[in-house]
Image: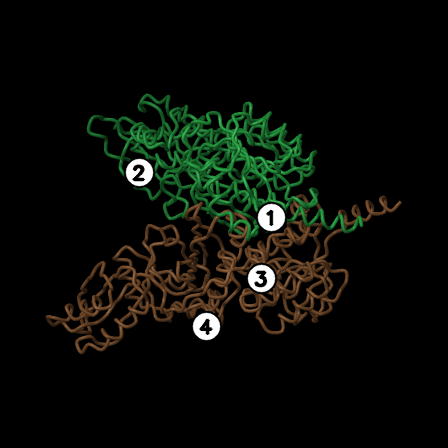
Chain colours: A brown, B green
Amino acid sequence: MKYNGQLLAELEFALKPIKVGVLGLGTVGGGTVNILKRNAAEIARRAGREIIITRASARDLQKPRICDTQDIQLTTDPLDIINDPDIDIIVETIGGAGTVKDMILTAIANGKHIVTANKSLIATHGNEIFAKASEQGVIVAFEAAVAGGIPIIKAIREGLSGNQIQWVAGIINGTGNFILTEMRDKGRDFADVLAEAQALGYAEADPTFDVEGIDAGHKLTILASIAFGIPLQFEKVYTEGITEIARIDVEYAEQLGYRIKHLGIARKTAEGIELRVHPTLIPERRLIANVNGVMNAVLVKGDAVGATLYYGAGAGAEPTGSSVVADVIDVVRALTSDPENRVPHLAFRADALADIPVLSAERIKTSYYLRLNAEDKPGVLADVTKILADHDISIEAIIQKEPPKDSTALPIIMLTQITLEQEMNAAIRAIEALPTVSGKVNRIRMETLG
Amino acid sequence: MKYNGQLLAELEFALKPIKVGVLGLGTVGGGTVNILKRNAAEIARRAGREIIITRASARDLQKPRICDTQDIQLTTDPLDIINDPDIDIIVETIGGAGTVKDMILTAIANGKHIVTANKSLIATHGNEIFAKASEQGVIVAFEAAVAGGIPIIKAIREGLSGNQIQWVAGIINGTGNFILTEMRDKGRDFADVLAEAQALGYAEADPTFDVEGIDAGHKLTILASIAFGIPLQFEKVYTEGITEIARIDVEYAEQLGYRIKHLGIARKTAEGIELRVHPTLIPERRLIANVNGVMNAVLVKGDAVGATLYYGAGAGAEPTGSSVVADVIDVVRALTSDPENRVPHLAFRADALADIPVLSAERIKTSYYLRLNAEDKPGVLADVTKILADHDISIEAIIQKEPPKDSTALPIIMLTQITLEQEMNAAIRAIEALPTVSGKVNRIRMETLG
């Protein structure tokens, strides 16, 4: 009798539709609703059961939506959904790391599985959230938090699981890439393109997160953790934005065979891990140098596989919704699995995370593009190159440009070999102190990504 | 007591190293051994337990190996391993679809999970193999069968599982891509580059599988099944190789802003599914047009995510081994899972595969690059364009080239709009019958891949 009862319970479970509650009905929430409705048949053919959104929350229920909310019970209070015993999976698309953190912890305490698109939440509170989730035996899935529709979390965590990952380098902020692409294609200035991006809705009214590299820093934090098996450490990411990139640097880079891209780079070295977001000169022949507009791409170098690249839309309702829905299906498949044998949240088992130091910015090693303005006098170049030599910095190329119409200062461009950042900082201070050099030395890091 | 006993059994299972037997110690087998040995610690941190190769088979035990076989019990008879009750997972890297099929079926009957790199086996016998595996509740994993180290099976089957896939287009044969890249970069002829590729070991002594598109056809068969949820149907793939591509076509394509790539294309249309492998003109600004040498790349278009691209090494010991090892880790994680809730072999559940017809070659719709040699007489162009118009074929562009030094025939290049292949075949027959046209009409299909 008991055996039959168990069988029946299992059968019922297998046939029962999975009930999803969505927190937030903005871009990503709306995209998720649209995909789960439109592709319901296709998804059931894959997952073996129906997945339906029964409840959703939104701050303002009167606001026009990009999705059809028929058959979805709406509320303004996310806790209504989090505390509903009928809901199996919570999809969180509210964003931000404030009150949302408490909501997620409550949902976990209630035994809900979580799918989230929230990069700042995971990057800043992920360690705590994953620990609580493991205690409760629930999954917190976050594919949509990095690079929108590109299944990059899955590729690194599962697809390359046989590799020691050596480095990850990605264009992981679409707004920044749109701005740099426009600057290059149309010879426009940063401020001008930013204003247009804001008008087009690509950039927020407050663009700080995008153009200062904070958004990319959140995503890089997550990529580095799953690549190297280290705890999430957003506070240790070096971030530099694209606001200082001048049109002239984009042009010079082009003439030298390079493109400037805003990259998030995580590299494992013998000394520790480099975590850095900054504009970067990349050889134009590299595939990632040709990723333009709002598109994202992530290069991953593994010791066995070599370099692999993943490209797609990094934002938008349905691309990001695509990752949310894939995570929901993964969670559904794992509902009957042994929690111990699931893919660990940070790719490596929580008890096997490594305590590898993250290097300070001064200890980064890279090569550099330098631009400075010098007086057109004999001896200037000798002074500059002597300073570089004193700091053990080898020069790959020096190019003198014609002075611009409105100036007598001679632009000098230098490309260096790989150098310790600390030495470069000291050299730049010394060069800027030369009486024959006017203004600041513009420095952009370079990577071959080979 | 029983409860404690059960706990102990579970604990023992959790701690027990997983024992893998490898069939074949050539390139892929050797690469797999090297990765599992070198990255053993990293892999244990991910999988939560040791994964060790305890047995391996090879035809000739005296042959020098790329891997260290110390601690591995060797045999010349794969059945020794297949019938060993101690082996949990069989890795098959022998290749070919003959005797290997029976080995795999025996291993499945013995309850072994299988990881294979064998594209021809899966493409031609996969339906039968997966059916038997499902009966036995075992997994047959085949990431390494398509595009080497790129986790493309996982990306489509799991990463894009919320999408209706619209089309897949890939450079999935490295040898062919190497030959086309050399032809373009160095202005060389097909036969000349093929001979070099054979000398370098990129191409087999019998290059038919590579240059005639059969290898790509095997891989496309697999990609189409997991993209659309249809049974494997290799026999319905239209395959055309690269042996007829002339240096002059590579040059003309270049002048028109295109690159010629050998693509495998699977597209779902209202009438049915197109499955085709052939040389293809692609706009040079597309990322995939810039994938060169032996590298592979697959573009996947989903209704929610849009176009995504996956790039990496398509062959070689460790890149392919990377996919084998990732599959082994996936299998280890799934050992305690409910077979009903695992990712289905062909992405969609076996009872939910769709019976969508595969279209014959005549029903393909695409645009075309045509090159023909005509006498330099008035009226020739009028005759040709009238034939095209009679077959409802719209012309996008016509370019007349100077006759080559040793000829009086005038090369005419035409680009058409999208056309039914059947109409194009009839038009070409009519054009070739014109007395003013000499020789054959060279036809290369074109895709925008937007």
Which x, y percent locates residue B277?
Answer: 46, 33
Distance CA(mark 1)–CA(mark 4): 34 Å
Q: Residues within 10 Å of mark 3 (few under 14, many from 20)?
A: many
Q: Identify the secondary structure beneath mark 3.
A: loop
Q: Please state the chain letter of the residue tagged with numbered disc 4 in the rendered image.
A: A
How far apart, in angstroms, are the residues tagged by discs 3 and 1?
17 Å
* Residue A198 appears in view: no
Label 4 element class: helix
Badge nearest the viewer, 2 or 3: 3
Extreme residue in the right direction: A1
Answer yes or no: are tags 2 and 1 on the same subunit.
Answer: yes
User: Which residue lies under the disc numbered 2?
Assistant: B184
Are labels 3 and 1 assigned to the same chain?
A: no
Question: Do the residues bearing badges 3 and 1 touch, measured as CB atoms within 8 Å?
Answer: no
Instruction: Report in which chain the residue with disc 2 lies.
Output: B
Q: Nearer the viewer, residue A270 or B280?
A: A270
Left or right of B312 in this view: A133: right
Query: Exactly how many numbered labels are in the figure?
Result: 4
Relative to B440, does residue B30 appear above or below in the rendering?
below
Label 2 Cα neighbours within 10 Å, binned few <14 / some 14-19 / many ≥20: some
Disc 2 and disc 1 in contact, CB within 8 angstroms: no
User: Where residue B67 appears, x then y in whole percent?
Assistant: 44, 37
Which structural element holds mark 2? helix
* Residue closest to the eye, B386 or B449: B449
The residue carrying mark 3 is: A117
Q: Which residue is mark 4?
A: A208
The residue wearing badge 1 is: B161
Q: Residue at x 55, y 31 (%)?
A: B123
* Residue B398 in sight here: yes
